[in-house]
Amino acid sequence: MSILDTAKETAQGLMQGALEKLVPLAPDSWIPGGVPDPLIARKHGLIGSPVSRLDGAFKVQGQAPFAAEFRFDRMTYAALAYATVARGRVASIDSAAAEGAPGVVLVMTHRNAPRMNTPAVFGSSPSAVGPSDLPIFQDDRVHWNGQPIACVLAETQEQADHAASLLAFTYDEEPSTTTLEGARAAGTEQGVMMGRPLLNKIGDADAALAAAPHSVDHLYRTPRHNHNAIEPHAATIAWVDDQLHIHDASQMVTQQAQTVAEVFDLKPDQVRLTSPYVGGGFGSKGLWDHQIIGAAAAKLCGRPVRITLSREGVYRVVGGRTLTEQRVAIGAQADGAIDALIHTGMAVMTPHNSMPEPFTLGTQSAYASPNITLQVKMAKMNMLANTFMRAPGEAVGTFALESAIDELAVELGMDPIDLRLRNEPDRDPVSGLPFSSRNIAEAWRRGAEAFGWNERSATPGTRRDGEWQVGMGCATGTYPYYRMPGAEARITLTLQDGAIHAKVEIAAAEMGMGTSTTTAIVAAERLGLPIEQVEVAYGDSAIPGAIMAGGSQQTAAIGGAVIAAHNALVAELLKLAGNDSPLAGLSPDEVGSEGAALCKLDDPGRRESYASILGRAQRDQVSVTQAGSPPLELMHWSMHSHSALFCEVRVNAVTGETRVGRFLGAFDCGRILNPKTARSQFRGGIIMGLGMALMEETQFDERNGRIMNPSLAEYHVPVHLDVPEIDVIWTDIPDPHTPMGAHGIGEIGITGVAAAVANAVYNATGRRVRDLPITLDKLI
Amino acid sequence: MSLIVNGTSVAPPDDPRVSLLDHLREGLHLTGTKKGCNQGACGACTVLVDGERILSCLALAVQYDGRHITTVEGLAQDDALHPLQAAFIEHDGFQCGYCTPGQICSAIGMAAEVERGVPSHVTADLRADAALTREEIQERMSGNLCRCGAHNGIVAAIQATFVVEAQA
Amino acid sequence: MTPFTYSRAGETAEAVRMGGAAASAYLGGGTNLVDLMRETVARPERLVDVSGLSTSITDTDAGGLLIGAGVRNTTLAEHRAVRERFPLLSRAILAGASAQIRNMATVGGNLMQRTRCTYFYDADGSRCNKRVPGSGCDARDGFNRIHAVLGASDACVATHPSDMCVALAALDAVVHVEGSAGVRTLPLREFHRLPGDRPDVDTVLAPGDLIVAVEVPPLGFATNSTYRKVRDRASYAFALVSVAAALDMDGDRVRDVRIALGGVAHKPWRAARAEDALRGGPATEQAFRAAALMEFADAQPLRDNAFKPELATRTLVSVLGALAKGDAA
């Protein structure tokens, strides 16, 4: 059995253990990325040049259609009613007034909803993306305060909203757990992420901590957060014969279509889900109850449905990041060498979902230490299923870890950057694997110089500007490199009027990350075509393969699939070229693309243009579909992105208000493909991190489990005046083992930011805030 | 009764509950104006009424009888992007693009306010006319949320469009 | 939104006649009322649009300003006379909401704003005596960071959200009202109520009363005035606390002073005790602080807002200090 065959079985969940032993030991050349992608060496061209978004003109003119902007004939509008108890049964439903209200087409509850299968919970199979393992509108049970329990369809949104407000419910309440203390008292369980326990033990960290001459040991707390994409979740849904059409806002297009198909006992190709534009996702734009409710209601009334969640509805239906309580204890020698690193704690989830908040993941590869204990435990609460939100785990985990490192630096009287570099590991401290690429020291060096770190006073509270206390802080951000299996790319070359046009189809999602533009750049470069001759199609479940815009892996997954499809295209074209071509006799791996032609890699003069090959073969089109190689590189190397973050804050000595005056991120994320969109991704993550640091909190009323600030007025996200000019620089050192030498960059931006802010606040004021957000009451 | 939307006279909705925003999106199929919160807390629905920026989600359409409403669809002239639209592309003043129409309409309204001498919360001297400094732009645009974090690009696009113009 | 009829009033008398009908509400800019209707917190059956009425700002014979109730917030904030003679009023308005909302909102509507208490807004899932009298108050033992520390009752701990009204309270503004009983005036300080056992009633207006104007009497030393708002983000957020103040110095002593506080009570809170303590006394930090502490002597903090008396005290001390030096922005 070849290693690739084994990998295919791994994708099916078999042979995992054997692979994990085998792959690390295999020669590099057997592993995807073992031979560097030729594009890494190509120094000119589009990769690395700033390219404006190809969809920009649509977006600035309001012409990009979002999910709630498609129309069907005879479309109805949906409004939801939500439960107001945390757990129990719906005892009675008074729907008479609603049913009699003007324009009402349907009132649907569990009593009349069509029978449906329970959506498969996220991670239970490669395509399962259900929010939890709960049936939807199939019984009278209430599992969280805010659960949708009725859906009204009407001729207009106004009529539907009004009718929904006329519904009255009574409940048989049942005991529920809605307090953190109650959940803790009921017992915590080992957190398990994708089948793996979030538990790592190297050496004896407790003993090493006790023996260490210097140590810090503190608890850090982070509250619940909501994504708050500005586009509320919405779907426009129609049944056409036995086909279900869903215009959705999705970052997991194909998987959602498949999960929905299972809910309605349909074959996968009976669900067509499109999502050409997504108004922000950050982890939230997946499958939630509303799409299934909307499809069920459309089926029941025989008319298309537009279901747009109100802003409150987004908070009731779409989960956010859960709360965490983390202990970080570090023992060190006087010279800063870490002897013991303990990062443990708990997060909260529900009895029905599969999402722990894996806050120790970033700690695994952060610092060299002979003794490490990492553990995430989960407590269960009756609440809306929590979910991933930008850098799940790392965003909050780095707050605790990097605050603690700063506290240790204070304890040791060391510069916090020196302390970090002192403990830079030479291989992954937990897995023992070599790093594929790690240039964190370079990021620190360049960042410190650009920011002017040497102007920082090590003594807190010593810089003042009028009422404002000024301080600097730093932190490391980190996020793993992923490449998920399942990605495919279809490349179609068309010869028309002597010109070559390439269409690249990928089942990916574009939420503003710049994916469609970057894919066009990379595909154009790989195909040797000008970008104007490359069209990228995405966001449609009819496209083969399955790619998720999650885990910052989409660029890599697309990159890998496009490499595979390009290889297949080369082979196909060589076949078509036949014996009359200058390329005759060459094998596909000797041949590449350049200048709208195939050429011999080490002898580019030996070439034939695509147009010539197709023309001679009397073909006007050639099309290949290929899946990316299995991501064995993830088991062969420890693969991560890193950042060095610098923050200057101003804390008002009178009011305690904190304003971020300057921020700089120095990133080590492989090769940057499109500096223009990459800069925006980094900044976007940093700004979300500033919100997390200073103002964001979903207020969960522990008395009844109800979210009490389901509004953009009461849940604060940063506004323009909160956001300084954010400097972003990068090492731009390619990772030799990834497609294009690139890493995904969607999530690393937010990691470490809250710690950088908290550390700067400490430097400004001498006050250490260990529970987010750092609001003014914690500083006066 | 009629509203004038991007220069075209249109009938108001029959139902007075219909907001200007929903009338634009669902009644007139002008979906460029976005619904982000429907509660006056995000600015995505910003349109210009007689040149002034307002939130169309809090406006009942019937209240705007006879008024001239400009939406993002009405900014480009003769197939040429409004300079601010072009600047948003150049400075990457958006990612997902959902808050973008509101940001753009808001910025155009803001420029007119500054031109008129309207002060802001951060204007140091209320007696003097405000300059379009970076901080002034930030404060005046704070009613438009962006969750992707394109704030720097938005401010840069506004500066490039309106500050340069003012100096020229 | 509950169905309603919409009519636009051509003149004030017509508006008052229409507004006298049961379940009527006056519509200004709609920035708060439309939101409350959408949340089903407000369910008027008749909307009388008064946004086109009373839109002028005129000088009064006494040397003050008469501000029409239909004047937009932006128009008032940018008005030359306001910026020069009553900068605290201009600053208070500019500190509130967003530019778009200020372009819509009217002066009359601003006075009628309702609290931002999230339990008040949660018509489906929370108890609120202000929304449903007698139902209970979920805020008292719940999330109450933005709630009152002064003048609250067992029934209600909500705060008034307006910035503009805080400045108007400091300026001893007078509200001109027209109703079925004719025209009358009400001091702004008495316009908004403390909650007592009727938190559902925000103001002393009778049903059908229409605000037609707000009069700001002359106050020479208001040229030395300002408004400072403290909030959880830099802009576009409601106040945690705010201070409107005007200071008249006599050498290094306080000749006269006006202080009103926002974010601390069910109404704009005129700090009369502090003013009395300061008048004629030294303009020192200690005196400012002592006066502020006196104002908060009876404060009753809740679970999440215990920081407010200290925050308001510090903010007031800072504002008065700046005004004493003549360098308040």
Image: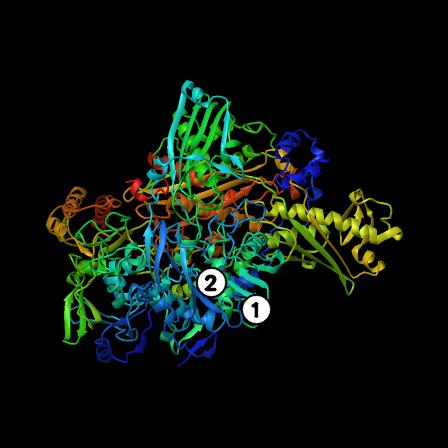
- Total count of labels: 2
Direction right: furthest residue: A580
Q: Secondary structure at mark 1?
A: loop
Q: Residue at x 57, y 62 (%)?
A: A244
Under mark 1, the amino acid is Ala
Q: Residue at x 43, y 26 (%)?
A: A330
Residue C155 coordinates in the image, percent (x, y): 19, 54
The subunit letter for the residue under badge 2 reads: A
Choose between A499 and A453: the one closer to the eye.
Answer: A499
Q: Are marks 1 and 2 on the same chain?
A: no
User: Mark 1 and mark 2: span between their CA atoms?
Assistant: 35 Å
On residue C95, the disc is none
Q: How is the image coloured?
A: rainbow
Residue C205 coordinates in the image, percent (x, y): 18, 68
Q: Is residue B130 left or right of residue A280?
A: left
Does residue B129 appear anywhere in the picture? yes
Q: Which residue is mark 1?
A: B80
Task: Give above or below for A77 relative to A551.
Answer: below
Q: Secondary structure at mark 2?
A: strand
Choose between A155 and A605: the one closer to the eye.
Answer: A155
Residue A669 coordinates in the image, percent (x, y): 57, 40
Residue B45 coordinates in the image, percent (x, y): 43, 64
Report crowding for label 2: few under 14, some 14 to 19, many 20 or more residues within 10 A (C-alpha).
many
Under mark 2, the amino acid is Ile
Q: Is residue A277 left or right of residue B63?
A: right
Q: Which residue is mark 2?
A: A307
Q: Is residue A709 left or right of residue A728?
A: left
In the rendered image, which quarter contains the N terminus of chain B?
A: bottom left
Give the quarter of the image for residue A3. top right
